[in-house]
Image (tube, rainbow, N blue to C red):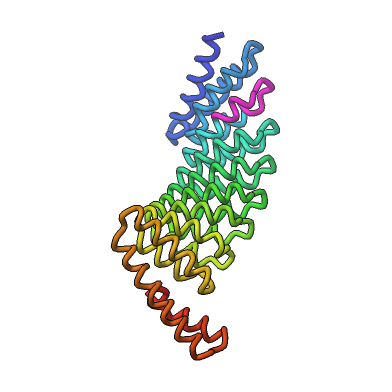
């Protein structure tokens, strides 16, 4: 049985070499015939088919792949490994043939899609995404790989899949934000299934790490709940990220919520020893209070008072 396995793999590999040589086309055809004869042996089993299929998948030998795929003893292990090898190597024709096999299931697609996304092979990614057995787990893992690598084109294709869910988006957004891939962050933010929880988690991470550009892009997202920003503000204050503190204070609505958030942020800065940031907030609190007092003495309408408050130096930075 061991001899059969070795013979099948040797014949398959020989076909790879000879097929690349135009002069040896006749010899190459003889190797296909040898593969066919070995495949017809009753002692052939799935592990032999796996080794042989993996041997030819990376080289793009379509004829030998077709012969092995047609064997009754082929198992999903063989399909999974060969599909991953072909996807990584960029052999579209082989990928298409393996995907057409009725034994293909979502776990095989996951490994292959990750391999194709990592290699940046858009055409193979498209082929795998079109398979009916694709699941959101597969999309989540591939989105993580593509987001970390900064591959916008593949991220866009995964985001367009109808099976993508909020959990996958949340995971992908976190990865993209940590890798500081701003364009991918924007693409994920634009997806209709993105939720508040994802925005808050990623914004908090970015605020803690001092990723100013990522914070700016998330704050510009209209669907974000401004009431949740206080907790992100405190995270930035604990980390001493003054630039981010200023940005979050600038988007808080209303004088009373702003004043409360600014005072609590000031307490955090004092406790943490962030003297420069504390001094800035203290100064802005004084300026804001003076302006509100002045506006109230003039008995101005509420909308005018709000406009005065919106012109505070902190919000105009």
Q: Where is residue 233 in the image (x, y as percent from the top left)?
A: 45, 59
Q: Where is residue 57 in the image (x, y as percent from the top left)?
A: 52, 32
The stretch in magenta equals: 68-81
Q: Where is residue 63 in the image (x, y as percent from the top left)?
A: 58, 32
Residue located at (38% from left, 77% from top): 287
Q: Foreground: 298 or 162?
A: 298
| Picture quarter with the N terminus | top right
Asked if residue 277 is among those painted magenta in the image, a careful observer would answer: no
Q: How many labels does the image show?
A: 0
Residue 92: quarter of image = top right
Answer with left or right where residue 63 lies relative to residue 88.
right
Residue located at (44% from left, 36% from top): 22
Image position of 71 with respect to 221: above or below: above
Asked if residue 74 is among those painted magenta in the image, a careful observer would answer: yes
Q: Foreground: 293 or 201?
A: 293
Answer with left or right where residue 190 lies relative to residue 209.
right
Residue located at (50% from left, 33% from top): 85
Q: Where is residue 25 in the image (x, y as percent from the top left)?
A: 48, 32
Q: Foreground: 116 or 152?
A: 152
Spot the residue most to the left.
276
Residue 276: quarter of image = bottom left
| Picture quarter with the C terminus | bottom left
Answer with left or right where residue 224 lies relative to residue 175.
right
Residue located at (66% from left, 43% from top): 131
Image position of 236 with respect to 99: above or below: below
Image position of 29 with respect to 120: above or below: above
């Amino acid at each position: 049985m061991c001899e059969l396995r070795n013979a099948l793999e040797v014949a398959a590999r020989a076909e790879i070499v000879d097929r690349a040589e135009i002069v040896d086309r006749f010899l190459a055809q003889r190797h296909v015939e040898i593969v066919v004869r070995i495949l017809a042996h009753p002692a052939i089993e799935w592990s032999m088919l796996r080794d042989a299929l993996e041997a030819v998948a990376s080289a793009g030998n379509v004829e030998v792949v077709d012969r092995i795929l047609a064997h009754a003893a082929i198992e999903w292990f063989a399909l999974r490994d060969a599909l991953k090898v072909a996807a990584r190597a960029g052999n579209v024709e082989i990928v298409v043939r393996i995907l057409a096999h009725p034994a293909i299931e979502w776990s095989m697609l996951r490994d292959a899609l990750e391999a194709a996304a990592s290699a940046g092979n858009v055409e193979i990614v498209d082929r795998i995404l079109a398979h009916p057995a694709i699941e959101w787990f597969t999309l989540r893992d591939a989105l993580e790989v593509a987001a970390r690598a900064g591959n916008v084109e593949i991220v866009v294709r995964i985001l367009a899949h109808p099976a993508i869910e909020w959990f996958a988006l949340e995971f992908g957004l976190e990865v993209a934000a940590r890798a500081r891939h701003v364009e991918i962050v924007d693409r994920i933010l634009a997806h209709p299934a993105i939720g508040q929880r994802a925005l808050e988690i990623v914004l908090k991470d970015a605020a803690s790490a001092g990723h100013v550009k990522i914070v700016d892009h998330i704050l510009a997202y209209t669907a974000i709940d401004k009431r949740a920003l206080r907790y992100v503000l405190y995270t930035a204050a604990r980390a001493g990220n003054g630039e981010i503190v200023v940005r979050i204070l600038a988007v808080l609505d209303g004088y009373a919520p702003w004043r409360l958030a600014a005072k609590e942020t000031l307490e955090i800065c004092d406790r943490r020893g962030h003297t420069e940031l504390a001094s800035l907030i203290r100064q802005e609190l004084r300026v804001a209070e003076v302006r509100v007092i002045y506006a109230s003495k003039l008995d101005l309408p509420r909308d005018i008072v709000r406009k005065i408050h919106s012109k505070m130096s902190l919000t105009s930075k």
